[in-house]
Amino acid sequence: MGVPTMYKVGTVCSRFDMSKITARRSLYGTGSCRMSTPKVSSLRRSEGYPERSTYKPNRPGGKMAKLTGAHLFIRCLKLEGIEKVFTIVGDTILPLVDAAEDEGIQFIDARHEGAALHMADGYARITGRPAAGIFTGGPGFSNAISALPAIYTSETPVIFIAGAAEMPEKGMSAFQEIDQIGMTTPVTKGSWLIHDKTRIPEFVATAFRTATTGRPGPVHLTLPIDIQEAEISEDELPQYMPQEYRPTGRPQGDPALIEQAASLLRGAKKPVIIAGNPARYSVDPAQLQELAESTGIP
């Protein structure tokens, strides 16, 4: 849970020279495969857990590379456009920390997990893109969850990720074990435990789709440390591109309804524009400003 004194609040952690991370690295390696980009005609989901997929990506013959669950998870985040992660380093996310360093994702360090998740909230609001925070399970998770009510009510697409004890110890009073899924359910759009290493891409895809479609909002993923450290063969993996299961651009309005709205504005005596926080994800700010200036509407 502690933060090395070398880190300053809000600084980018480019290297993690810690003995625990080095020890973890010696156990699970770094992986070396390159993510492929297959086409998927459709991706059906059921409520709750995503539907198990039988899709296997087409690859040329030859020996498939090995990678760990942590590296696969981080590569899925990169595929979704995540470049920075807000965090405080802790034991049950050390494989993810190491993988993020290997994959070139920057860790933005804070002094409190709740503050770090608020930083992710602010980053998402400014950039108009989803943001991610990664925290150790138990006390790190419970500190971070204090930020969720504000993020939930402001409808910001934040991916809240937490580690946890090994899956075989779940429900057996494992070290720092709490009901992370149950605690986040009331203040997120969706909350999932990743219980199978081969389904990491599905859960990440579901989390981002849920966070960014309809009314945006936060989601939660718990990734146990044994799933992070598990070795996976590349040929086991279903892989999806974001544009194949969720909108990746701004939504397009119905032209007829847009014309109807414009007609109402032209005939209004005292029109006013009320643009809430979700507008930043659906409307180009420059276009909104142009509308206000060209019409003189406050």
Image (tube, helix red, strand yellow):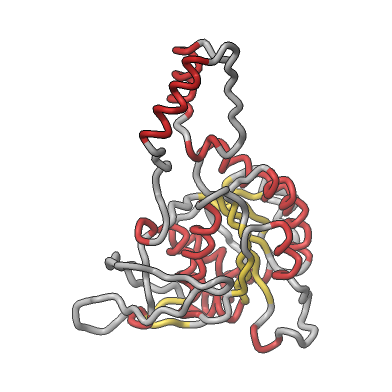
Is there any visible trace of residue 106 in the rendered image? no
Is there any visible trace of residue 186 in the rendered image? yes
Residue 239: where, in percent of width, then height? 37, 70
Task: Identify the residue shown where x is 64% and y is 66%.
Answer: 191
Residue 108: where, in percent of width, then height? 60, 49
From the viewer's side, name the closer residue of 56 and 117.
56
Task: Identify the residue shown where x is 47% and y is 13%.
Answer: 295
Q: Above or below — where is 276 with respect to 170? A: above
Residue 225: where, in percent of width, then height? 61, 76
From the viewer's side, name the closer residue of 79 and 18.
79
The quarter of the displayed image where residue 138 is located = bottom right
Quarter the N terminus occupies? bottom right
Q: Above or below — where is 61 with respect to 204? A: below
Residue 227: where, in percent of width, then height? 56, 79
**Relative to 196, is 35 on the left or the right?**
left
Quarter the C terminus occupies? top right
Task: Identify the residue shown where x is 57% and y is 39%.
Answer: 278
